[in-house]
Image (tube, rainbow, N blue to C red):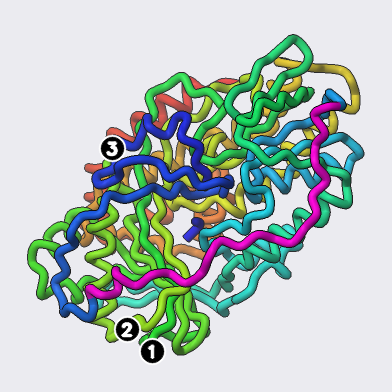
Amino acid sequence: MDTLLKTPNKLGTFIPQLHGFERISSNSHPNPSRVKLCVKKRPIKVCSSSTSSALLDLVPETKKENLDFELPLYDPSLNKVVDLAIVGGGPAGLAVAQQVSEAGLSVCSIDPSPKLIWPNNYGVWVDEFEAMDLLDCLDTTWSGAVVYVNEGVKKDLSRPYGRVNRKQLKSKMLQKCIANGVMFHQAKVTNVVHEEVNSTVVCSDGVKIQASVVLDATGFSRCLVQYDKPYNPGYQVAYGIIAEVDGHPFDVDKMVFMDWRDRHLDSCPELKERNSKIPTFLYAMPFSSNRIFLEETSLVARPGLRMEDIQERMVARLKHLGINVKRIEEDERCVIPMGGPLPVLPQRVVGIGGTAGMVHPSTGYMVARTLAAAPIVAKAIVKYLSSNSVRGEQLSAEVWRDLWPIERRRQREFFCFGMDILLKLDLEATRRFFDAFFDLQPHYWHGFLSSRLFLPDLLFFGLSLFSHASNTSRFEIMTKGTVPLAKMINNLVQDRD
């Protein structure tokens, strides 16, 4: 699905909860929705032939690629105070840089690898990118999607889906940033020091950059944005590959949004038992009859599943589907923290994306939501800096207020309520849930997945889902949702502007 940054500063706070992960990989650029982690190599028990297990020995062929741009660099000898310093050069950071600089304000983007193409695959609903005039940044689109609830139930979703062209999206953003005079500095950020009016960003190369506003766009590393509550999210864990295959059984005009079938585990009783408790599904984007993106995904679990477990299930699934992988172009190991508390609101450093708690707590989606929020953040920064009416803490508070108004906070509480229920569902209960979910009117399931529903529409969504659910599923929602519902109501009552 959506596929982040990692600076090692604070990620250690949640790593111990993920079985099988040893340490953070210091990937050099921010990426808005997923964290990649280095996985400890362990033998993987594969309940299939040696040829299938050989899949895990294939080496991805795609190497890191840099864009061919001459970036205007920040000159530290000038000691220039910029209007906005953005830490992180992922889609969220560049989108804000582009829009703030268009208003004539000075912007410096700080990133260790500012020209590196983002590595992970982003999938989005086409209507989301169309609304932002980004259709030219989709390299493949499908007329719709399918969901395999079980061996006998298949849902056809008539909502076009697309794969983001990462090179095109970053090129488009960089070109506009360069044209607008954005300055770039290639380094990591180690600290930020605040004064009454300005802040000083301290970089790993010793350079110090003064700015009126500092924006943390570093993803889930939470590099600069502060949290004051225990961080205990759920985790979406996925292993994906872009592969050349002999063939596959999927319609090339439809992407596979979710495949919850588990017959591929019949010969692996132990693995099937684990999957029955914490299920995984296949997410697939077929580009042609012999080229496809395949990703085995745990929707949400606490603690997160081990990567080896995910890979083992994927190998068994591909063997059952008769998919023989000849060559791997790219692979990705992804972990998305979902839910958990919002950062301290407000605070001096402004945030956007993963560092600001913007991942969808029930789905893991964030790319489209973050890109849609970039104009809100940019507009607020431009408004208050241009008016000279507020500075420092007060300016940051106004930007945070525009990013997280009370209706968005209430929406997030409802999504966290949904996540808390999903955390408690086994495979059969999960199947029943999505059987009802995708029977809803498109207004409801489109709006839920794309963060377009707000209270009271979310209440009507919940009632509609309950009415479409089977009696067994209703009972499960009632019994497993009572405590999360009480928690959500309490949080809604306590949250005030």
Q: Percent x, y for residue 54?
A: 25, 75
Please name the residue shown 76% across and 42% down the image.
184
Please name the residue shown 45% across and 51% down the image.
364
Which residue is identified by label 3? 17
Range drawn in magenta: 53-77
- Magenta run includes residue 61: yes
Q: Earlier in the sequence, mark 3 or mark 1?
A: 3
What secondary structure predominates along the stretch shown in magenta?
A: loop
Please name the residue shown 31% across and 50% down the image.
39
Q: Is residue 89 visible?
A: yes
Which residue is identified by label 1? 247
Q: Earlier in the sequence, mark 1 or mark 2?
A: 1
* The quarter of the displayed image where residue 263 is located: bottom left
Q: Nearer the viewer, residue 45 or 259?
A: 45
Residue type beneath disc 3: Gln
Q: Which mark is residue 483?
A: none
Which residue is identified by label 2? 323
Q: Mark 1: few, some, or many residues within 10 Å (few <14, many ≥20)?
A: some
Q: Is residue 131 visible?
A: no
Q: Earlier in the sequence, mark 3 or mark 2?
A: 3
Q: Nearer the viewer, residue 153 or 351?
A: 351
In this view, 204 is above or below 461 = above
Helix, strand or loop status at disc 2: loop
Residue type beneath disc 1: Gly
Helix, strand or loop status at disc 3: helix
Q: Nearer the viewer, residue 322 or 42?
A: 42
Q: Mark 2: few, some, or many residues within 10 Å (few <14, many ≥20)?
A: some
* The quarter of the displayed image where residue 375 is located: top right
